[in-house]
Amino acid sequence: MGTPWWARVLRCPGCGSSLRGLSAQPACSSTDCEYHTAGFPCVDDQLVLIDFASSIFDRTMYQADNGSVMPRDVSRRSLGSRLHALGFGRNPVAGANCQRFIDLLKQESRKPVVLVIGGATVGSGAEALYADDGIELIGTDVYASAHTTLVADAHSLPFEDGVFDGVWVQAVLEHVLEPATVVSEIHRVLRRNGVVYAETPFMQQVHERAYDFSRFTQSGHRWLFRRFSEIGAGPVGGPGVALLWSIRYFARALGAGDKLSRLISLPFFWLRFFDSLARGRAVSDAASGHYFLGRRAEQAIPPQAMPKYYERQGAKPVRQWSGKALDLLARRR
Ligand SMILES: [Zn+2]
């Protein structure tokens, strides 16, 4: 392993000190830190910068193979992945938002640096991010793949403060024990006004077994990102997609296995076309998931803003609580 440019922005996930011995035996530089002597493992030539003392992931998981706790279909070519793509279609919301995310970043930087959290598998609709040579991408996940730069646990990102222009976190926050901790880490590693894109499930059943913990309404998702100003937010997959998920998991609960339950829901694929007819706030109330596109802000939105935030959902465009709106609200109180 050589020492690439991003090695300069790394820090110990345990204590925040700088790292040493990156090309040979990576360890923490602080003699007070347990990772000074224990060091950090490598898998598939990638650093594993995890604070094992506080992580759900154990050091032994990274001794044998890529560190994945379950079989993964990184290429999305397995039968299960193909059936899913056939029934659920691709994610047009993420595709459009990805382009918007890229445009925002390029308005401010010639070569923006983007951190992808949960990037071992390329997210549906995120392809443009990977195809763009004008973007410096740092991929992280809890296991190594061809799309990751290093392995990290997002509860304690192994990067210095303010080093990224953008953070992409798609279908990840439901899988972490403490979503709020992860979002505060995203805030920390983003530069001032840096851009975040998050997509998180709402009406979706458990889909990563022991590693699936939370769901968010659009309001709950907004509150999670309360220290960010909103550029856009809304449903990803409407009630039709949510109903497809329910049919599949209904069959699964009655004993159909993983593949058979996918097959059983397949003839109902047309339900998702009704999503284009669904209107207003009722879509967010029943959505399969929600996205949030925003900028790092230095103050949080006030709790009193949340009821109004709900009332405005479904009205287009969902765009509020800019710095100016916050000032106005502060003056009114
Ligand atoms: Zn340390």
Image (spheres, grey):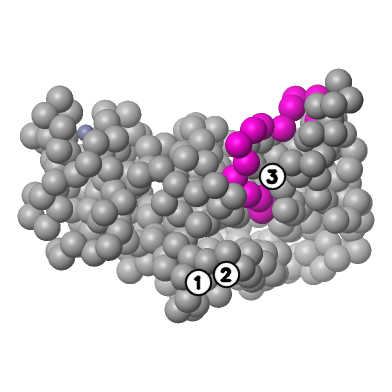
Q: Is residue 259 left or right of residue 218?
A: left
Nearest the camera: 206 or 238? 238
> Of circles 3 and 1, which is in front?
1
Quadrant for the N terminus, please. Answer: bottom left
In terms of secondary structure, where does tag 3 sit?
strand
| 144 sits left or right of 103 in the view | left
**Is residue 255 visible to the viewer in this orientation of the structure?**
no
Q: Residue at x 48, y 65 (%)?
A: 112
Q: Was residue 145 drawn as part of the magenta stretch in this picture? A: no
The residue pinned by badge 3 equals: 229
- Other residues around mark 1 within 10 Å, as few (<14) / some (14–19) / many (≥20): few
* In the image, residue 298 lies in the stretch drawn in magenta: yes
- What span is colored magenta in the figure? 292-305
In space, the residues marked 2 and 1 are separated at their CA atoms by 6 Å
- Gap between marks 2 and 3 measured at Cα: 19 Å
Badge 2 amino acid: Lys
Amino acid on which disc 1 is placed: Arg
Q: Where is residue 74 drawn, in percent x and y? A: 41, 66
Mark 2 touching mark 1, by CB under 8 A? yes
Give the Cα separation between the discs numbered 3 and 1. 23 Å
Quadrant that contains the C terminus: top right
The spot of residue 319 in percent (x, y) is 81, 50
The tag on residue 106 is: 2
Asked if disc 3 is less than 8 Å from ligand 1, the answer is no
- How many neighbours does mark 3 have within 10 angstroms: few (below 14), some (14-19), or many (20 or more)? many
Under mark 3, the amino acid is Ser
